[in-house]
Image (spheres, coloured by chain):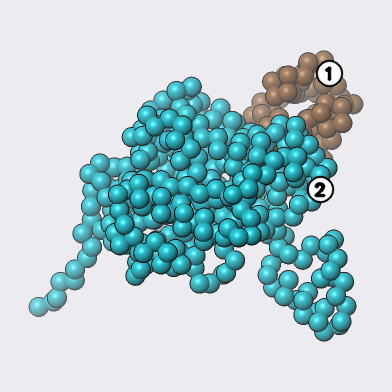
Amino acid sequence: MANKEEILAGLAEIVNEETGLESEEVQLDKSFTDDLDIDSISMMTIVVNAEEKFDVKIPDEEVKNLKTVNDAVEFIANAQG
Amino acid sequence: MTTTLKQYEPVAGSRILSVGAARGNLVVTNEDIAGPIDSSDEWIQKRTGIVTRRRADRDLSLLDLTTQAAQEAIDKAGLTGADIDAVIVSTVTSPYATPSAAAALAHNIGATPAPAFDISAACAGYCYGVAQADALVRSGMAKHVVVVGAEKLSDFIDETDRSISFILGDGAGAVVVGASEEAGISPSVWGSDGERWETVSMTRSMLDLRDAVETARRTGDTSALTDPESKLWPTLHQDGPSVFRWAVWSMAKVAQEALDKAGVRAEDLAAFLPHQANERIIDEMAKQLKLPDTVTIGRDIKETGNTSAASIPLAMHRVLQEDPSLSGGLALQIGFGAGLVYGAQVVRLP
């Protein structure tokens, strides 16, 4: 089970792979759409890769609630149980 | 003594003998449609891969497109309408719920009295049709089956809709399936998931439209009929991100299952012909399937847009036109869409 720091680092890696954004750009307070310019389709790719990496389920209807990087980190941390 | 009942005599194999194509007569650019969705050529290309889509004007009907595509396929197979003994049209945009487009097509191509029927399986409809044609031919029930995927989606779009309308085009793609000594169509992997019926669907039913008209007539208040904002005409819409996730990760598994059932590896393929939904789906599926560079990927979407049931045979027609040496090679074709429904098989290219 990954702690929040590890989740953030892992997410940053996934975002980098999908968008080419530097991992340092992926900070907790950043909005996926407004700050990182990630569209809904890239977001789905990131979500599926995060599911695999952290062994969690992120349902479609949850994805729209993941507005900031912190939202995603919190969701994954809780979903890990 | 009991009487022995006769049955059809099965044949060894079936294959696609030929392919025909018809596209809408209008070339619609991204700039032509960007205004009402507050978008741009760059945005649309980046998100969908579409540069233009082909649409049909009011004088070019769904049946015209269907007939053109079917006639080309029949001619290329060296057959005439009289040789065709089953006609299947997959469409979700026929202006008449009944009679079928297929019966009119059978008449147009001179195949009467061949059995003719429409199927409704949206973007998977062509693969559903090929699955049925394969079964009809191998069972001995038909010798030559025409399968057409045909759509005039521009009749069912909302120019302000950002979910799907802007990617849609009009066209028809047809194949003739006939007997062959060797297997030319693999087992089909096909299915449905009706729990997700609303993921891709019409905005309302025809009965909703009827009720609105009746209400206007009864009350004398016709504002609902004249206000463009009321959007009474049923149009297509989708939950794009949800469809993307399903189309890539669930459908890549279906595609792999089709390869496994066919006894074929990705590197054995000459072509990959997925439903032309969105180029990002196509790219991501190819990545998931680990297709080597030697596999030609159908990308008709760039110029034709998403034509639902027509998109796979149109993509097949294009790859064969651009590279005739692919003929005789194996192609993985997979359709997926509203229902949700999906269908896939490996076929030998005509």
Q: Chain B shown in which color? A: cyan
Chain on which label 1 sits: A
Report x, y in % for residue B232.
77, 66
Residue nearest the observer in this picture, B31 or A27: B31
Chain on which label 2 sits: B
Residue at 35 percent of width and 40 percent of height: B350
Is residue B73 at all visible to an observer of this figure? yes
The amino acid type found where label 2 is placed reads Pro
Report x, y in % for residue B84.
32, 59
Report x, y in % for residue B167.
67, 44
> Farthest residue toward the bottom?
B218
Q: Is residue B284 left or right of residue B19?
A: right
The residue to which callout 2 is attached is: B36
Residue at 81 percent of width and 36 percent of height: A66
> Farthest residue toward the left?
B1
Q: Is residue B41 above or below residue B194?
A: above
The residue to which callout 1 is attached is: A25
Report x, y in % for residue B64.
51, 59
Name the secondary structure under disc 1: helix
Q: Is residue A23 left or right of residue B126?
A: right
Residue nearest the observer in this picture, B23 or B49: B23
Task: Output the letter for the chain in brown.
Answer: A
